[in-house]
Image (tube, rainbow, N blue to C red):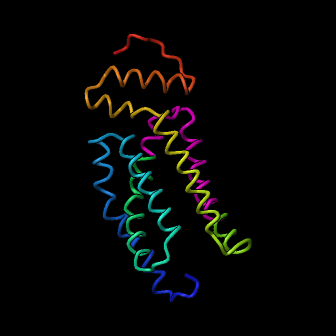
Amino acid sequence: MLCKPMVDESVLRNAFMMGAVATSLPIPILSDIFGRKMFFEVIFVITLIILFVIYLMTSYDWAIFLMGALGATLPGRVIVGRIFYIEYTNPSKLDFLMMIMLVMQPLAVFFIAFYFQFISKHIEEIQLNFIIIGVFMALFILVFVPESPKFLYNKGKHSEARDTLRAVASFNEIKNPDENDE
């Protein structure tokens, strides 16, 4: 991309943003219908596949398409992922943890820009490492994180929601004062 005109770079950014804008309304609504966990997992896996294909490809035309597709996954990762995260976090620690998330994102961008500018012009090593970390995160969520208790409750699965809430409360070290609470 260093030899490409600025117009080509802006086309890639616009493709990403068009994908994000096009899916910012339907994705959160669909996650309410089909479940946050399943929807987040599918979006996460699609994102990893797109990133891996971007890592391997050399075609500019495919890059435009893939950046649009990557942008389309943004609401699933950011909106649905944050809602999913908030529903599992101890309310007393939520403000602090959200602040850490908001600080870490720009720091990650700064680190990647710094690495690319001063350490190596080959961003592939970082990109591949993030893809590998993402695969492990997706597997962890798939195996260890249950569906959102709010989603389960809204779908009438009250006993599953109660079991999930107990597990979340136990993980967050919150004592349940009344085990028989409906």
Please indicate whether residue 136 sits to the left or right of residue 69 in the image.
right
Which quarter of the rendered picture does the C terminus lie within? top left
Tell me where residue 49 appears, x and y as whole percent: 45, 58
In the rendered view, would you say 157 is above or below 141?
above
Q: Is residue 90 magenta?
A: yes
Q: Residue at x 59, y 60 (%)?
A: 128
Please indicate whether residue 148 sits to the left or right of residue 51 in the image.
left
Quadrant of the image occupied by residue 93: top right
Q: Residue at x 60, y 64 (%)?
A: 109
**Nearest to the observer: residue 46 or residue 5:** 46
Q: Is residue 140 magenta?
A: no
In the rendered view, would you say 106 is above or below 15?
above
- Start and end of the magenta stretch? 82-110
**Nearest to the observer: residue 182 or residue 59:** 59
In this figure, what is the number of numbered marks?
0
Q: Residue furthest right?
A: 119
